[in-house]
Every structure is written in structure tokens, then in C-alpha cells.
Image (cartoon, helix red, strand yellow):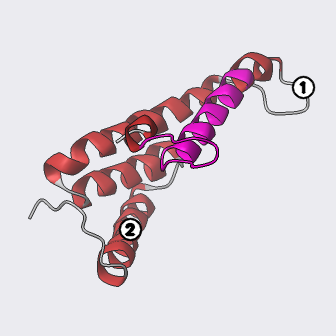
Amino acid sequence: MTALGLGLGTLNQPGAGLWPLAISVAVIVLSLAQVFIGRRGGDGEKFSRYSWLSLVGLATLLGLVALLPVIGFEIPALVLSLVWMKFLGGESWRSAVLYSVLVVGVLYGVFVGALGTNVPHLF
């Protein structure tokens, strides 16, 4: 569901989608400014070949969103965490697997066990 689908309302009577839309627009504008201004570096970090890892992170996150309704929460979340820890974080295989299982277990415990959230499951 998008912010527009929730309804924007008016400034006197804001709808549920007004703030998500406003924040999204601000993030997009600031991101585009960073792409063009940030290339010069200055006092901040310059773009390098490692900057492309952010796109890998975004692509895997979009994969999680696409797979979540199809095969549930556990497997996509485990794969996402494993990819992020091993390939983006540089952890060893043993650490990446251990941390990924722990992260998914904690997320499952918090959202399903403690909060009673209904998440899609494969099984």
C-alpha cells in the first residue's frame, strides 16, 4: 500500500498517508542531492567502488519484500541476513551463519512471540 492509497487529507485534517509521503519525498530529494553533490567528496566520504554495495543491499531487501508473501518470513530473512553479514559485512561463514540464525530468531521472537504480529509463514 502506498501513501497515496492511504489518503493525504488536508493540512487541517491530515490523512494517514500525508507524513509517509512527505518523509519519502524528503528522503528522495536529499538522496538525489547526495548523489550529485556527494561525488565531489569534500569533508565527507567520496563515492568509491564500495559505494555500489548499497545497491546490493537495496536489491536484497527488495528480494525479501518480493519473497515474503510467497515463501514466508523465515527463509528470506535468513538469506538476507546471511548475504548482508557475509558479503556486505565481511564476516566469516561461521559467524555469518550463527549471527543470521540469531537475528532471525530474535526478530521472530519479538514480532511473533512477544507482539503477536501475524507474519507470513512457509510451514
Tag of residue 98: 2
Q: Is 56 part of what is drawn in magenta?
A: no
Q: Is residue 47 visible in this depiction of the protein?
A: no
Residue sitting at x 40%, y 44% = 6
- Residue at 50% across / 30% down in the picture? 55
Few, some or many residues within 10 Å of mark 2 (<14, 14–19, 20+): few
| Depth order, front residue of 95/80 | 80
| Left or right placement of residue 56 versus residue 74 in this view | right
Q: Nearer the viewer, mark 2 or mark 1?
A: 1
Image position of 54 (left or right of 121): right
How far apart marks 2 and 1 lie (CA) works out to 39 Å
Q: From the viewer's perspective, is 76 left or right of 52?
A: left
- The residue furthest right is 43
In this picture, is 1 found above or below 102?
A: above
**Kind of residue sitting beneath label 2:** Leu
Which residue carries the number 1 mark?
42
| Quadrant of residue 43 within the rendered picture | top right
Closest to the observer, 6 or 103 = 6
State the SS at label 1. loop
Quadrant (top left/top right/bottom left/bottom right) for the N terminus? top left
Total tally of numbered discs in the picture: 2
Give the residues drawn in magenta, as a range: 7-33
What amino acid is found at the position of numbered circle 1 in the picture? Gly
Provide residue 24's location: percent of width, then percent of height. 57, 37
Q: Residue 82, image x and y in percent? A: 38, 53
Residue 76 screen position, x and y as percent: 27, 51
Q: Secondary structure at mark 2?
A: helix
